[in-house]
Amino acid sequence: MNDRGNIYLLLGSNLGDRTAILQHAREMVAEKAGTILAESSIYETEPWGLTDQPAFLNQVIEIESASKPEDLLNILLQIEQELGRIRKIRWGARLIDIDMLYYANLILDNSTLTLPHPRLHERRFTLIPLSEIAPEFIDPKQKKTITQLLDECPDHSTVSKVS
């Protein structure tokens, strides 16, 4: 199994000091989960799914990690918890959300983890920052590049570069 790069994470926050929370999340990922190889710009995005909530800041990072996918997921959930994430409402407001988008070319679907992330191809707030750092990465399930997935994305929500 590839443990060198091509592990892509989506960071998101729409409560509190969103910029500081994303920074803290990146620091904790680097400390606990793996080495950060690339970071997209930060984007302000409309909420998706449950739309009556504040706008999000989102960023995609690429890491390399020696952790297996399920172990990495547990580390990411622990980071979310340490940063104050409380899971109440699906797609609801949150201090931090860390989603594993890809773990190299792994296709996995079990009760704990689905890879690639099952809805990433439907979400501009994921595809735009991902296309910034990995435009030619080929989705192992869709068999298309990130650029192609973005071009075909049915989502038309606003995604604006912040920094």
Image (tube, rainbow, N blue to C red):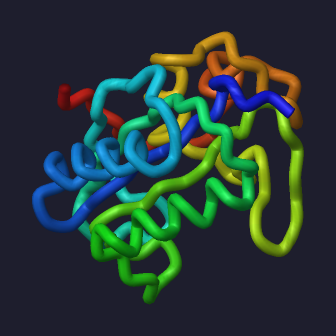
Position of residue 6 measured from the top left corner of the image (x, y, whole percent): 66, 26
Left-right relation of 14 to 97? left
Is 156 drawn above or below residue 133 in the view shown? below
Residue appearing at x 67%, y 11% in the figure: 136
Q: Tell which of 123 and 129 is nearer to you.
A: 129
Q: Tell which of 62 and 45 is nearer to you.
A: 62
Is 126 drawn above or below residue 93 in the view shown? above
Is 140 drawn above or below residue 122 in the view shown? above
Q: How many numbered marks appear? A: 0
Residue appearing at x 47%, y 55% in the figure: 98
Left-right relation of 80 to 8? left
Left-right relation of 126 to 109? left
Residue appearing at x 40%, y 40% in the figure: 30
Q: Quadrant of residue 150?
A: top right
Is 55 drawn above or below residue 157 in the view shown? below
Q: Quadrant of the N terminus?
A: top right
**Residue lying farthest to the bottom in this orientation:** 88
Q: Quadrant of residue 157?
A: top left
**Residue lying farthest to the top in this orientation:** 136
Q: Tell which of 126 and 8 is nearer to you.
A: 8
Position of residue 18 measured from the top left corner of the image (x, y, whole percent): 18, 54
Residue appearing at x 46%, y 33% in the figure: 61
Q: Quadrant of the C terminus?
A: top left
Q: Quadrant of residue 52?
A: bottom left
Position of residue 144 measured from the top left corner of the image (x, y, whole percent): 80, 21
Position of residue 90 measured from the top left corner of the image (x, y, whole percent): 52, 78
